[in-house]
Amino acid sequence: MPPILGYSASVEAAKLALEAAQNALSRDVGQAMAQANWPFLRDRHDVQAMVELIGTLAAQDPSFVSNLHDAGDKVRLAQPLRGRPLKARENADAADGVTASNKA
C-alpha cells in the first residue's frame, strides 16, 4: 500500500481495502464450493436455495452461526504460524519452560 498523504487519501485507501476484502470473500466461497465435490448441487438454482437455507438457519438458530465460527476458528488455528521463527536459544528455553522472567 502506498504511503497515505492526507485524510482523503486515507479514506480512499480504506474504501479500496474494504472492496478488496469483500471481493475476496465471494471468491473464497466460490472456490470452496468448487472444491467441495457435492454431487447433489445440480445447478445455480440449487446453490441459490442452499444460500437461502443458510441465511434462514443463521437467522433462526444462533448456535448454527456459533458452530460455523467454531469450525472456522479450528481450521484457522491449525494453519502454520506466519512470521519469523524463534531463534535457536529461545526454542530451547521454550521447550525447557524457561522464560525471561525466571531465567535469573
Image (cartoon, helix red, strand yellow):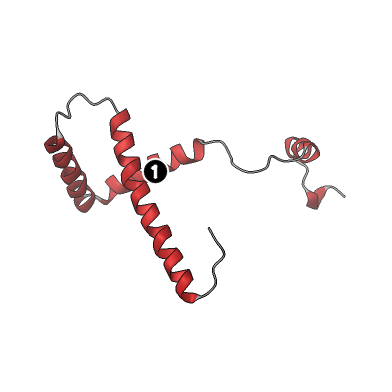
Determine the secondary structure under disc 1. Answer: helix
Q: Amino acid at mark 1?
A: Asp
Residue 84 coordinates in the image, percent (x, y): 67, 42
Residue 98 coordinates in the image, percent (x, y): 78, 42
Q: Residue 41 vs residue 91: left or right?
A: left
Residue extending farthest left: 45
Q: Is residue 40 above or below residue 100?
A: above
Q: Is residue 56 above or below residue 35?
A: below
**Mark 1 highlights which residue?**
70
Q: Residue at x 35, y 47 (%)?
A: 25
Q: Residue at x 20, y 23 (%)?
A: 39
21 or 51, nearer to the observer: 21
Q: Residue at x 74, y 37 (%)?
A: 91
Label 1 crowding class (10 Å Cα cut-off): few <14, some 14-19, many 20+?
few
81 or 3, nearer to the observer: 3
Q: Residue at x 27, y 25 (%)?
A: 37
Residue 51 coordinates in the image, percent (x, y): 19, 43
Q: How many marks overall?
A: 1
Q: Residue 58 vs residue 81: left or right?
A: left
Quadrant in the picture for residue 95: top right
Q: Residue 45 vs residue 14: left or right?
A: left
